Image (cartoon, rainbow, N blue to C red):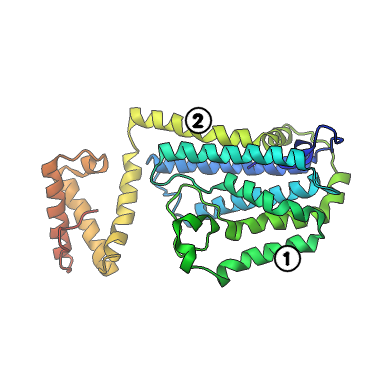
Amino acid sequence: MVSLSNAALEGRNAPARPRVPAIDVARGVAVAAMVVYHFAWDLSELRLIAAEVTLEPGWRFFARAIAASFLLLVGLGLALAHPDRIRWRPFLLRLLTVAGAALMITGATLLAFPDSYIFFGILHAVALSSLLAVPLTQAPWWAAAGVALLIWAVPALAGGGVFELPGLAFLGLASHAPITNDWVPVFPWTGFVFAGLALGKLVRGQLERRAAPIRSKLGRALAWAGRHSLVIYLVHQPLLFGALYGIVQVTGPNLAAVAERVERSCPVSYVQTGIAEPVARDTCACTVAEMKSAGIWTDFLAERLAPEARFRVIAIARSCLARSGARPAEGGAAP
């Protein structure tokens, strides 16, 4: 999520290379998309909307497209910043900035979400992939393209075994994804940086020759966001989540959204235990109807059931399961 190109990577004694406005605008578009996604994630996490952003295919594709675009732009930036030689001093200063920000994200999320903290998210991926890719800024474009293809192929060729160790989760070669709020592992995501580097080496001359100034207000706003993407990344989510969390403390969750989630996930939970889908749907519909009739549905959604009401929910669920033609599981079931 950071600008690794042009003047930002120049040393004190090196002549400043002109910025390429199109790259700043492209990065700004990615920043705007990131903010939209995180706003939706916050609404979902706080149960203000029915959509479960981390599970729905459309939102998952959107998130992956955003990550891929940032990493492609990192590679493009490297190609533009180091056309004839590697400017190590500014590169390392920027690398330390990004790595420090990544550690801040890890620490903050460890405190806020200890069960799903970010140990290798987008900033971690940017830092490591930049370090791996910068030597190839002086190689032909096809070398970077070849490395990108190799990185994308590795998950299909290797995995499991030693890669199941938790300490190697950042590689992305385990059979199961770790529980974390942001995970951008080396394989296959680093491949996008090398692909961006190859693309940058191919189109660098055209981009620099056509670096026309931005005239529209929207374009200038996006370019500004692109130039300050790291700062925006660090501050936008605490501001968004903090504001929405404060609202939820006053209004409570959106019970209509919670109800839609419960009614959608209830049959799935039964099917996962081996119960046929038609029976699962009938059981859930019966359970919800009985809870509404008993006057405990709203309290169930708001998670404020008294202990005796909890036992009543279990009894209702077991009764509905039996009526739907399935044998109740040990301990009962509930939406």
> Is residue 3 in view?
no
**What kind of element bears circle 2?**
helix
> Is residue 303 in view?
yes
> Could you say which is closer to the camera, residue 23 or residue 219?
23
Task: Tell me where residue 10 appears, x and y as whole percent.
Answer: 79, 37
Q: Which residue is mark 2?
A: 239
Q: What type is the residue that disc 1 sits on?
A: Gly
| Left or right side of 187 for 288 | left
Number of dots carrying numbers: 2
Check whether the beta carbons of the residues at disc 2 and disc 1 lie within 8 A of each other. no
Among the two numbered marks 2 and 1 on one chain, the one whose residue lies closer to the N terminus: 1
> Could you say which is closer to the camera, residue 30 or residue 235?
235
Q: Which residue is mark 1?
A: 146
Q: Outermost residue toward the bottom?
A: 157
Q: What type is the residue that disc 2 sits on?
A: Leu
Task: Tell me where residue 120 appears, x and y as whole percent.
Answer: 53, 49
Q: What's the residue at 33%, 42% (across, down)? A: 256
Task: Tell me where residue 105 appears, x and y as whole percent.
Answer: 52, 39
| Left or right side of 299 for 178 | right
Q: In which quadrant will I find the N terminus?
A: top right
What's the mark number on residue 280?
Answer: none
Q: Nearer the viewer, mark 2 or mark 1?
A: 1
Residue 7 picture quarter: top right
> Could you say which is closer to the camera, residue 137 or residue 282?
137
